[in-house]
Amino acid sequence: MIARRSLLQATALVMLPGAGMASDQRLLRFVFSRPQRDPRTQWLIRLYTDACAMLGRQFEFVDVPAKRATAMVLSSEVDGELGRTAAYQQLHPRLRRVDEPNNSVSFCVYGLARAAPFVDMAQARNQVLRCETRRGIHEMEAFLQQHMGRNHSSEISEVWQGIRKLQLGRTDLYFDVREAVEDYLNFKGCGERPLEQPKVERLATIATTTGHCYLNQKHASLAPELARVLAQLKASGTSARYLNEELARYALLCG
């Protein structure tokens, strides 16, 4: 609804006499690695709609598959991506990171509650445990490649697949972003439901970082100003309020 309203506003500006070129320059189009209906996507849509407005810009969200998101920013089909980790800059130096983070990000390992406690990756390697992560999480892909190699690590496309394979005994450890897994476990009424048993739990936090917006090169000069207004929205409590409201709204539908 928010994204649609922003798009209609932008379209209306284009239709004003003499405003065509100016409005095109003011419109910023963003993608994200999660679908539009996801509560955390809705949170970022609201947050960046406000941030863009504070800079005299219009915001539009473009809903695309996660694997296409970065490619569209690099090719200038869209202007930015709403959330990637701080280290993503090293993988894609042509992108410009907005230094003010959206949020903290925890990479965690999950397993069955009845399994032996997780100690470290040396133990996982010695016991030849089967490890898995979600495709596209570059930090976790590199981590498993370093510690386990290709013979004992694999990738899936969706969170529910990773959790289901744990529950069915097809893998031993699942590595993913904490909020993604726990949203899936908490909001059981939408999408693929986790099995009731065996219970899956978080075993350890592997690493922590921050999530950031990234812009393509033609908008690199906007990054400092966007960082400034994001900091203001966080300091005022607006960002946290939007996130809590969207999680609560989603819980009513999918709890």
Image (tube, rainbow, N blue to C red):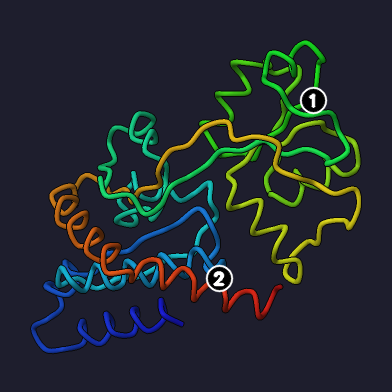
- Residue located 27% across and 73% down the image: 50
Between 107 and 134, the one nearer to me in the picture: 107
Element type at mark 2? helix
Q: Name which residue type carries label 2.
A: Leu
255 to 167, vertically: above or below: below
Classed neighbour count for the residue bearing mark 1: other residues with Cα under 10 Å, few (<14), some (14–19), many (≥20) = some
Image quadrant in which the C terminus is located: bottom right
Badge 2 crowding class, 10 Å Cα cut-off, few under 14, some 14 to 19, many 20 or more, is many
> Residue at the location (81% across, 31% down)?
172
Foreground residue among 253 and 4: 253
Q: Choose top left, top right, bottom left or bottom right for residue 23.
A: bottom left
Whole-percent x, y for residue 46 in the image: 38, 72
Residue nearest the observer in this picture, 192 or 228 = 228
Residue identified by numbered label 2 = 247
Of the numbered discs 1 and 2, the one sitting upstream in the chain is 1
Task: Locate residue 204, reporting x and y percent.
Answer: 65, 34
Q: In the image, 205: left or right of 117?
A: left
Q: Residue at x 32, y 64 (%)?
A: 29
| Kind of element beneath mark 1 | loop
Q: Where does label 1 land, which residue?
A: 130
Residue 166 % position (x, y): 83, 40
Query: Looking at the image, how many numbered discs can be counted on the residues?
Result: 2
Amino acid type at circle 1 is Arg
* Along the line of sight, the residue nearer the viewer: 116 or 250: 116
Closer to the eye: label 1 or 2? 2
> Is 58 on the left-hand or right-hand side of 162?
left
Q: Is residue 99 above or below residue 253?
A: above
Q: In the rendered view, tell whether residue 42 sits above or below residue 163.
A: below
- Name the disc covering residue 221, or none: none
Q: Tell me how far mark 1 sits from mark 2, CA to CA.
A: 33 Å
